[in-house]
Amino acid sequence: MALPGLAISGAQGQLTGTGLDGFYRGGRRLLSRCQVRVAGREPQPVHARMTGADSARFVGTLRASPAAGPDPDVVVERTRHADGTERITLRSAAPRPLRLPVEIALGTDLAELGAIVSGTAGPELPASVHDSGLRWATAGAAACVTAGPPPSDALASAGLLRWDLELAAGGTAAVELRVRPGGAGPLRAAGHAATSPFAPARAAGDDPRVAALLHAAVGDLQALLLRDPAHPSDTYLAAGTPWRCGMAPAEALAAARMALPLGTRLAAGTLRALARTQLPGPGPRAGMIPGPRRDAGPHLPPSCTGTEATLLFPVLLAEARRWGLPEQETKELLPAAERCLAWLRSTVGDGTYLPDPHPAGPARCETQAHAHRAALLGADLLDAYDRPGATDLRQWAETLRTAFRTDFWIEDRGGGRPAAALAPDGRPVPHLTAAAVHLLDAGLLGAGRLATGLLDKVHAEQLARLLGTPAMDAGWGLRSLAAREAGHNPFGHRTGSVRVQETALAVAGLAAAGYEREAGGLLRGLLDAAEHFGHRLPEMFAGEQRSAGGAPLPHPAACRPAATAAAAVVLMFTALAGIRPDAPARTVTLRPVRSAPLGELVLTGLRIAGAPFAVRISRLGLAVVEEAADGLQLGA
């Protein structure tokens, strides 16, 4: 993928016209069938792999010479790119020249992805011969495939292009296909711009998996980039492919926050794009960033991702400033952040908790964590620019903190647990979920300090213990609902699957709070899972308990790649180094994980204060800065 372009096929490389197979642009399938036959046969598939986030290579073989015996003498290689190009190369090992007929069967329904998923896509459309290929059209869309060299024959009725290719002994021949929307030029992906919003981060160390995982994550983030159509200089991340190739406000903000070690340009573009969607006043929703509802499982009603996005906005702006967002850009975005904070205070009013959805929803545990963090980091941001409201936000945060530690903690013989929510009547919803990890994500203030969390030390220690138990840790990562809870389903989105973002937040939060054993266990489990996914983590996978010789089970509805999963890799590795920058103060504080769960770890190509940053963590858990901006001092 290189959004808005996307290509999907099985490992054989053939686009069969069934399922999701096809070349897509902007969510429309331009080509659903592309089947290659050489000398009347399909090549025998022998190899398939991703060669980058936006490309794949498929290799097949066949016996073309009557005297070839049992050994294949022709290799057919297909190199496919998400921009809609495919090169089909034939390599001969025959001792004599070969003349091979090559046929490529093409077809499409020009269906939207939503229609394909729901099973309502229509049949293939009739083709017409166009230029050096074929064309399909409906009343609202068109697509064409052009070929080079031009085919010797094009049969529109059968959707077929034909060549008779001459291969010298040991020679090669190639055909290149270009898939385009009707009347459109080459597809230009946002991630293929001359300058990238991401620093060229690399990882190395004792564990060889870290290099592959970070490399894949940065490549996937690049491929998920989209441009704001009305403001092309502003880029943000699509939620994931193939299901969610557009903006999802909460996920876009969360991913941009976790990706801050790669630079602040993505954060700035995401914030500007979402500021333009902010709801105007007057009214109870004034200042909100709208977002759709999200299923929360059987125990709670759907939550509002707009609430989460509105609370994430000032947090991302405040932390982006610490990582080096220029002052002018921060000042330009400050009014939108103030409107988010004003919405928070007006919605809570004289109460203590923020209901979600407002006004009659439950008070969710994670929503209070988001709101508390937004209040503290928002107050810090307001103070930095001499804006009013900081004192009121801090006072409310203190009130929330005091009440939360009483109302949300459920005592039991095992030491207690945080409630998933308080129902509108004040009754606690007792289920243990991975949403509790947000209680460990307090946010970054100045001088390398983390904000105060909602839990006290005793309760935080108990939560850390719970997250490390088999009920929550599946061995591959953190379950979204504890295995012993009613309604647990290892394939449930919010009822038992392992969600990569929540696991990464748990690793970072546990490490920052000093619970290194639990953090290390979750980290190693997720690294083991990543190997089974070719180092390209999906947004979630089944939360079945790990067993000897087993493998994590893919979730059929998961996006892979996904913005939050890819950005979570950046968060985990930088959390191991404990990097806490304060660019306005020209300092960076390092709080590495002393147990060094992955041995030596070297992170290079990060970005702080607009300049490259590199750090080495030794096997003893000691950190050494190897590259930094001029004048950047190591904080105490």
Image (tube, grey):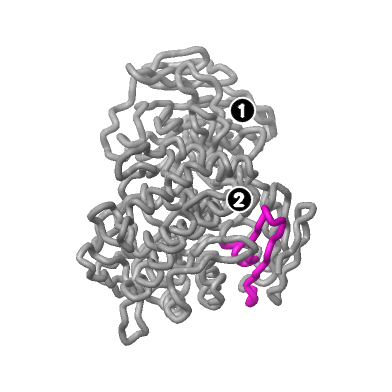
In the rendered image, which quarter is residue 458 located in?
bottom left
Q: Which amino acid, mark 1?
A: Ala
Observer-nearest residue: 543 or 176? 543
| Magenta-span inclusion, residue 151 | no
Q: Residue 59, percent across and down? A: 56, 42
> Residue, x 50% and y 68% (percent of image)?
452
| Relative height, residue 292 to residue 127 (above, below) | below
| Residue 451 visible in rendering | yes
Q: Which region shows up in magenta?
A: 572-596
Q: Residue 541, percent across and down? A: 41, 59
Q: How many marks?
A: 2
Discs 2/1, front:
2
Q: Say which quadrant the C terminus sits in.
A: bottom right
Secondary element under disc 2, as helix, strand or loop, is: helix
Position of residue 315 in the picture relative to residue 584 (left or right): left
Q: Which residue is mark 2?
A: 321
Q: Label 1 neighbourhood size at 10 Å, few (<14), some (14-19), many (20+)?
A: some
Secondary element under disc 1, as helix, strand or loop, is: strand
In the rendered image, which quarter is residue 289 located in?
top left
Position of residue 456 in the picture relative to residue 418 (left or right): right
> Residue, x 45% and y 76% (percent of image)?
456
> Residue, x 71% and y 65% (percent of image)?
635
Observer-nearest residue: 633 or 23? 633
Q: Which amino acid, mark 2?
A: Arg
Q: Which residue is mark 1?
A: 174
Position of residue 319 in the picture relative to residue 548 (left or right): right
Observer-nearest residue: 319 or 153? 319
